[in-house]
Amino acid sequence: MSHEIRTPLNAIYGFTELLNKTLLNENQKEMVNIIKTSVEILMGIINDILDISKIESGKIKIDNYPFNFEETIYGIRELFCKRALEKNLKLKFNLDKKLPKIIKGDKVRISQILINLIGNSIKFTEKGNIVVSLDFVSEDENKICIKFSVKDTGIGIENEKLETIFERFEQASRDTTRKYGGTGLGLSICKSLVELQGGKINVESTSGSVSSFYFTLFFDKLNENEIFKILEDEMKEKKNEKLSNLTEKENFNNNLKMITN
Ligand SMILES: Nc1ncnc2c1ncn2[C@@H]1O[C@H](COP(=O)(O)OP(=O)(O)O)[C@@H](O)[C@H]1O
Ligand SMILES: [Mg+2]
């Protein structure tokens, strides 16, 4: 089912981007941007609903592959830099030096949780800062424990809402959707994804001033040889990517020509 919904949405999104690159008057530009924003919102909601139904039917499997942890975190930072800047917010990432570059786990699901939490922090903060911290907790021969936290100086959450916000379609107040948008699904997805990886997510907050969401997870450690091999593979991949990016750019330009001609 997901494919049938995502494909047409991706097509609408892709073509609004291409349309934006053609000669448009101000009025038309504004209309195209409204279509683009609406599709973005719709894609977000549909992705959340598809994830919820996948979680409910027990179809989400947690991967356990080596991945570049440091790079993944910096990739996420990149994703939010612009949005934070637009709202004049300071977005800080503290990556504990004791953490290894490469760990074994589910890169996509860890990113998804952090993206949800950071997205919320930016959405619910009007001034101040957002601090994302990745801290070393403990390790033994085979496992390393990492604490993830996202803190902000936003609107905060009332005490009695701290439990319910992790439930489906729950928001801290009735006017949240009107003021900030959203459906109240993000945190419920985060909670399930953290639990599927054997952790627990918590929140501490003072209404009107700060919120801090945090969770800890255990990851399998890799030995030096394995790490070296992965870094080497990554280098090779990056070289290939550079080459294919060039062809992608050419394809894009050709598409553009076809549309503008
Ligand atoms: N960083 C935050 N600061 C203040 N309130 C928050 C924050 N994160 C989540 N919330 C509250 O928890 C609710 C649920 O979050 P979420 O499930 O992500 O839903 P949505 O973002 O779609 O509203 C939000 O509607 C909001 O009321
Ligand atoms: Mg959210």
Image: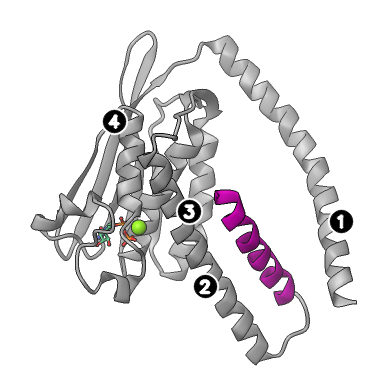
Question: What whole-number distance in Å separates the C-alpha atoms at marks 1 and 2?
Answer: 29 Å
Q: Reading the chain from its start, which is encountered first: label 4 or label 1? A: 4
Left or right, residue 11 beside residue 57: right
Q: Main secondary structure of the magenta part?
A: helix
Is-magenta flag for residue 214?
A: no
Check disc 2 and give the amino acid type: Ser
Residue at position x 40%, y 46% in the image? 53
- The quadrant in which the C terminus is found is bottom right
Residue 216's spot in the image, x, y percent?
Answer: 29, 31
Question: What whole-number distance in Å separates the C-alpha atoms at marks 3 and 1?
Answer: 30 Å
Q: Which residue is at the far left?
A: 160
> Does residue 147 show up?
no
Numbered label attached to residue 38: 2
> Magenta residues?
1-20
Q: Quadrant of residue 28?
A: bottom right
Q: Reading the chain from its start, which is encountered first: label 2 or label 3? A: 2
Residue at the spot of label 1: 250
Does the residue at mark 1 contact the one at mark 2 (Cβ under 8 Å)?
A: no
Residue at position x 14%, y 57% in the image? 161
Does the residue at mark 2 contact the one at mark 4 (Cβ under 8 Å)?
A: no
Residue at position x 74%, y 70% in the image? 18
Element under label 4?
loop
Residue at the spot of label 3: 47
Instruction: Look at discs 3 and 1 and give the one toward the viewer.
Output: 3
Q: Reading the chain from its start, which is encountered first: label 3 or label 1? A: 3
Does the residue at mark 3 contact the one at mark 1 (Cβ under 8 Å)?
A: no
Instruction: Look at discs 3 and 4 and give the one toward the viewer.
Output: 3
Left or right, residue 225 beside residue 41: right
Q: Is residue 177 above or below residue 118?
A: below
Residue at the spot of label 4: 199
Q: Reading the chain from its start, which is encountered first: label 2 or label 4? A: 2
